[in-house]
Image: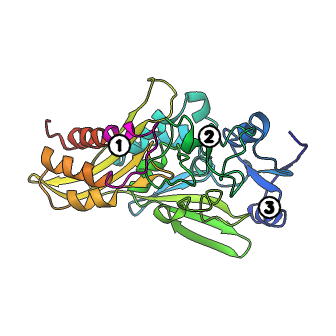
Amino acid sequence: MRPFEYVRADDATAAVARVSADPQAEYLAGGTTELDLVLKDGVVEPGRLVDVTRLPLRGITLAEDTLRVGALVTMEELAADATMSERVPFVREALLAGASPQLRNMATIGGNLLQRTRCRYFRDSTVMACNKRAPGSGCAAVRGPARMHAILGASEHCIALHASDLCVPLIALDTVVDIQGVDGSRSVPLTQFYVLPGERPDIENVLQHGELITQIRIPLPPGGTRSGYLKLRDRASYEFALTSAAAALLIEDGTIVRARLALGGVGTMPWRALEAEEILHGASATGLTFRAAAQAALDDPFTVAGTAFKVELAKRTIIRILHTVSGVRP
């Protein structure tokens, strides 16, 4: 680990200006990912860490069916919010499935959106072939053991998985990310926030250097919407998803009038299953419909030897959560 400077920021504008002006500077909030990368794994070597935990970016407010969540709200604070339980319970379920209580009390919502992959090859600095760390070096995961890797949005350039549980229901809800930069503020839908690896897996999202997430805005679904989050993993406690699915359905007289579906554990980014939503919308809530939606969601996977099992597992995850949320018996 190389030495770095630690700075505590008291003003958002000054913090943004400071990080934007220094290519070696990065933000520090809860630190549950950043400190691992810097102090333990040694794959990120910032020259300066700017602590933003004192900035006024907290609070959860409800206005006109939109929940505004400050970037420094912790996972535990959001999980405890009454609106979560009443209107979007699958967000709360994803939060509680995503980490231990100790981590949930430290990890921030803004940081969760920006968490780095758990790919063993990315986090091992002795592995030379990692396009995410060293563009153009190759992808060791494509030819090595790769059970915890992506099958959607992946290619021979990178199969690193986006591990967030929270982002799965958030992307299903059309959440919007508010961002502050040196040239002002902007808002980006979460569906457009992440970038497919392509030939540059090191570019993971649309943030410019120095831009700071200030809050997220979660549009709440219509009354009567039922939702659920299902996470399949190797063990019941504190483990990343093999596959997961977040579903929200509004059903009237047996017909699905509104459907939202997103997947985790399978994508290089939180994966919105738009093709599956098209099949669900306006269709009868039946097992046949659910199977067709699952097939559409996994229509074109990129698999290697270690990840091929995820295709069928993800389909079964989708079918199961749709049955659970709809109340239709298998």
Label 1 Cα neighbours within 10 Å, binned few <14 / some 14-19 / many ≥20: many
Q: Quadrant of residue 317?
A: top left
Q: Which residues are magenta?
A: 298-313
- 32 or 143, which lies in front? 143
Amino acid tagged 2: Ala
Apparent side of residue 8 relative to residue 34 in the rendered image (left or right): right
Q: Position of residue 259 (x, y in %)?
A: 26, 56
Query: What residue is pinned by disc 2?
Result: 107
Q: CA distance from mark 2 to mark 3?
A: 21 Å
State which quarter of the image contains the C terminus: top left
User: Quick one: SS at disc 1?
Assistant: helix
Residue at the spot x=45%, y=38% of the render?
305
Query: What residue is pinned by disc 1?
Result: 311
User: Quick one: SS at disc 3?
Assistant: helix
N-terminal label among 1 and 2:
2
Amino acid tagged 1: Val
**Residue 308 on the magenta segment:** yes
- 75 or 49, which lies in front? 49
Residue 30 seen: yes
Furthest residue to the left?
A: 253
Q: CA distance from mark 1 to mark 2?
A: 31 Å
State which quarter of the image contains the N terminus: top right
Q: Which mark is residue 19?
A: 3
Residue 225 seen: no
Residue at the spot x=58%, y=46% of the render?
112
Label 3 Cα neighbours within 10 Å, binned few <14 / some 14-19 / many ≥20: many
Q: Position of residue 136 (x, y in %)?
A: 68, 58
**Residue 111 on the magenta segment:** no
Amino acid tagged 3: Val
